[in-house]
């Protein structure tokens, strides 16, 4: 038993040493090397099929096209008999509802159909499926200090990320596998007017399995939970 305890202590000490000696940028580079070893994200042009499963709701199936070279984003989402489509090409936007682009002001207001929402979807899907490569974008601040932590009974290398005010106010944390540097969890918190993190806000997302898309390892399953009470929110499943 004493020998086993000494071995565990040795492993933990080694992992702590790794966390202390590796910088935030070095950790990010290793994570990107794991997920995008051939630097494919910059020219990404592919289609994602995603199913969202949420408690007490029917599934929502989405077809998402991201074409970075042409600055094109398209999403078609269907739940039950309702279908919405958003297309963003550079600075232009198109919206369709149940296959029709003729949308009255009253319908747009009732269903929250707008170009602002289209841009929101574009930023949302491009950011989440572009991680961790998107952490190289301008306005992203990588904390130089890497922490060794235990999260949900598993050891991780934890990276803190903040953003310039023009990019975003949330504080994000990314949790990487200590051996492979695979991204396995990310988490965000809201901040108050003084930029102080609110520990009762935000969510954490557990990533599992992997799907290879255009030679990039993307998380196949993303399970969402509230930070404050661990309440389960839903799961996104990447089918392509």
Image (cartoon, rainbow, N blue to C red):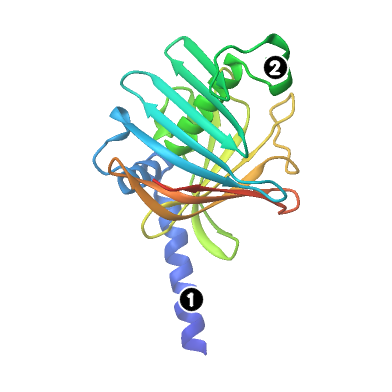
Left or right: 48 as drawn, with respect to 221? left
Judging depth in this view, the residue of 81 and 16 nearest the camera is: 81
Residue 91 visible in the snapshot: yes
Left or right: 234 as drawn, with respect to 73? right
Please, what secondary structure does the residue beneath circle 2 have? helix
- Mark 1 nearby-residue class (10 Å; few <14, some 14–19, many ≥20): few
Where 135 falls versus 9 (above or below)? Answer: above
Residue 72 lies in quadrant: top left
Coordinates of residue 172 in the picture (x, y in percent): 57, 38
Where 236 falls versus 126 (above or below)? Answer: below
Residue placed under numbered mark 1 in the picture: 8
Q: Earlier in the sequence, mark 2 or mark 1?
A: 1
Residue placed under numbered mark 2 in the picture: 107
Residue 132 visible in the snapshot: no
Left or right: 34 as drawn, with respect to 208? left
Where 148 falls versus 44 (above or below)? Answer: below
Judging depth in this view, the residue of 176 and 43 nearest the camera is: 43
The single residue placed furthest to the left in the displayed view is 38
Residue 52: give its label: none
Picture residue at 54% right of the left edge, 20% below the top: 119
Judging depth in this view, the residue of 155 and 143 nearest the camera is: 155
Picture residue at 40% right of the left edge, 30% below the top: 65
**Residues at circles 2 and 1 in contact by the CB criterion of under 8 Å:** no
The single residue placed furthest to the bottom in the displayed view is 1
Q: CA distance from mark 2 to mark 1?
A: 61 Å
Residue 97 lies in quadrant: top right
Coordinates of residue 36 in the picture (x, y in percent): 31, 42
Picture residue at 71% right of the left edge, 54% below the top: 230
Coordinates of residue 39 in the picture (x, y in percent): 26, 36
Question: In which quadrant of the rendered image does the C terminus lie?
Answer: top left
Coordinates of residue 157 in the picture (x, y in percent): 48, 53
- Mark 2 nearby-residue class (10 Å; few <14, some 14–19, many ≥20): few
């Amino acid at each position: 038993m004493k020998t086993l305890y000494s071995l565990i202590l040795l492993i933990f000490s080694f992992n702590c040493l790794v966390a202390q000696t590796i910088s935030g940028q070095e950790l990010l580079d290793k994570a990107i090397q794991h997920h995008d070893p051939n630097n494919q994200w910059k020219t990404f042009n592919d289609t994602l099929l995603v199913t969202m499963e949420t408690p007490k709701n029917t599934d929502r199936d989405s077809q998402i096209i991201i074409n970075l070279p042409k600055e094109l984003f398209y999403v078609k989402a269907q739940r039950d008999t309702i279908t919405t489509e958003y297309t963003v090409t550079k600075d232009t936007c198109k919206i369709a509802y149940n296959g029709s682009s003729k949308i009255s002001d009253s319908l747009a207001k009732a269903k929250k159909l707008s170009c602002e929402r289209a841009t929101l979807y574009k930023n949302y899907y491009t950011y989440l499926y572009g991680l961790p490569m998107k952490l190289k974008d301008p306005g992203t601040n990588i904390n130089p200090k890497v922490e060794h932590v235990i999260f949900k009974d598993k050891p991780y290398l934890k990276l803190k990320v903040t953003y310039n005010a023009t990019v975003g106010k949330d504080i994000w944390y990314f949790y990487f596998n200590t051996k492979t540097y695979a991204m396995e969890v990310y988490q965000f918190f809201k901040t108050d007017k003084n930029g102080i993190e609110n520990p009762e806000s935000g969510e954490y997302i557990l990533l599992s399995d992997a799907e290879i898309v255009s030679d990039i390892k993307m998380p196949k399953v993303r399970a969402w939970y509230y930070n404050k009470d661990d309440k389960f929110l839903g799961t996104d499943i990447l089918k392509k």
